[in-house]
Amino acid sequence: MQSWDQRSRYLLPGLCLGAVLLAMAGGCKKQAMQGPIAVELPASADLEIREPRVTLTLDAGSVYFSVVNPAARGDRLLRVETAAAERAEAHESVEENGVVRMVARPEGFEVPAGGTLELQPGGKHIMLIGPQIAADAAGPVALTLHFERAGAIEVQAALSRMEGMDHSGHGGS
Amino acid sequence: MELGRACSAMAAGAALLWLLPATGCVPTQTFNGEVVEPARPAPELTGVNWDGQPFRLSEHRGKVTVVFFGYTYCPDVCPFTLAKMKQIYRDLGDRADGLQVVFASVDPQRDTVEKLAAYVPSFDRRFYGLRLEQADLQAATDGFGLTVQYGQPKEGPETASYYYVDHTGTFFIIDREGRLRLKFPPNATAEQMRPDLEKLLAT
């Protein structure tokens, strides 16, 4: 039997060595994770539409969603059809040196192979021109997304009104 | 032995100095935004607020002010910018009393005072929403160094004529003394701006 003193003599260096080894192992693991990941993508797979949503302001509206493409070949979002507006056009907000520009993208948006197309505020979006949504409508808004390969996909988008976000302080005006 | 101890202390001190900047512990006043140097009096901004009252920026000192430009027909960036400001107000809590938000329209043709009254206060009634007459808009464009370009109107079978306005989306941050101190790009987040505003609010 060793006394506590004898054991503790080896305890600290042992712990230090352990910590160093753990750190090294952690470092190695990190490096290993940085290597290329070889994943074989399926030749064809359904597109997944995530978080479709419509935001309305006084005279305009925007549609946002993500398109996840697990397949090995790309696709293209050609257009969006909806009864909720006179027209729906593919647009992109582009910032250059602090200046925000609106650029029409009549060719639609590419959906990369094994990747995601993101439509989000301040970037790619579907602009609703002449929104035809009743003032008291709560949504959802029916949209048909047309893709080059995948064809038509129907989705129900959540509706939010930007200018009506503050319900707490509304007065008479 | 004493020498050894002194060396150890020095090594530890050096290591600490090397580590400090990495950990962000250096107690200097740094900002996330682009610092305007030297700080200079903010350009004048004259217009009519959504409530019909005349507004002159130089008469609104004593508070930290965020000025930005946009238009109500703007479908994508502007509403989210106002929502961002609303989030900052909410996150600041009581300290928001020291902050004022000024949204100035670059589209006087469509953005009437009535239009602004239907738009700006619905985000937050404390926000100013200004309509600038052409001459005042020109003065603001020159003073703040803005780019404002009106797109060609588009027509549809039923859609009324509409156009976009490419415009500077920069946030201009003005201190309590009325000096232009910081600028943030249009895509800056509320989380990036709030710490800087808190620092200016504390002075």
Image: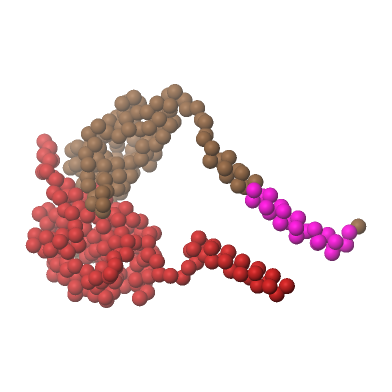
Chain colours: A brown, B red
The residue lying toward the viewer, choosing from A57 and B110, is: B110
Q: Residue furthest front?
A: B3
Q: Is residue A65 above or below residue A59?
A: above
Rendered residue at 68%/54% (across/down): A19
- One can see residue B107 in this view: yes
Which residue occupies the foreground of this view, B135 or B115?
Answer: B135
**Number of dots carrying numbers:** 0
Task: Please determine whether, in this image, residue B35 is positioned above or below residue A65.
Answer: below
Query: Quarter of the image holding residue A68?
Result: top left
Is residue A91 located in the magenta-colored stretch of the structure?
no
- Residue in view at x 34 percent, y 61 percent: B33
Q: Which residues are magenta?
A: A2-24
Residue drawn at (30%, 34%), measured in percent from left and top?
A109
The dominant secondary structure in magenta is: helix
Query: Which residue reaches farthest right?
Result: A1
Of residue A23 and residue B85, the one placed in the foreground of this image is A23
Instruction: Give the x, y percent position of residue A148.
Output: 31, 26
Percent from the top left, x then y, of residue B47? 14, 66
Above-or-below relation of A90 to A98: above
Kindly indicate the quadrant of the structure image that contains residue B91: bottom left
Place of residue A163 in the rendered image (x, y in percent of width and height, measured from the top left): 25, 55
- Report x, y in % for residue B9: 63, 70
Residue ID at (35%, 67%): B197
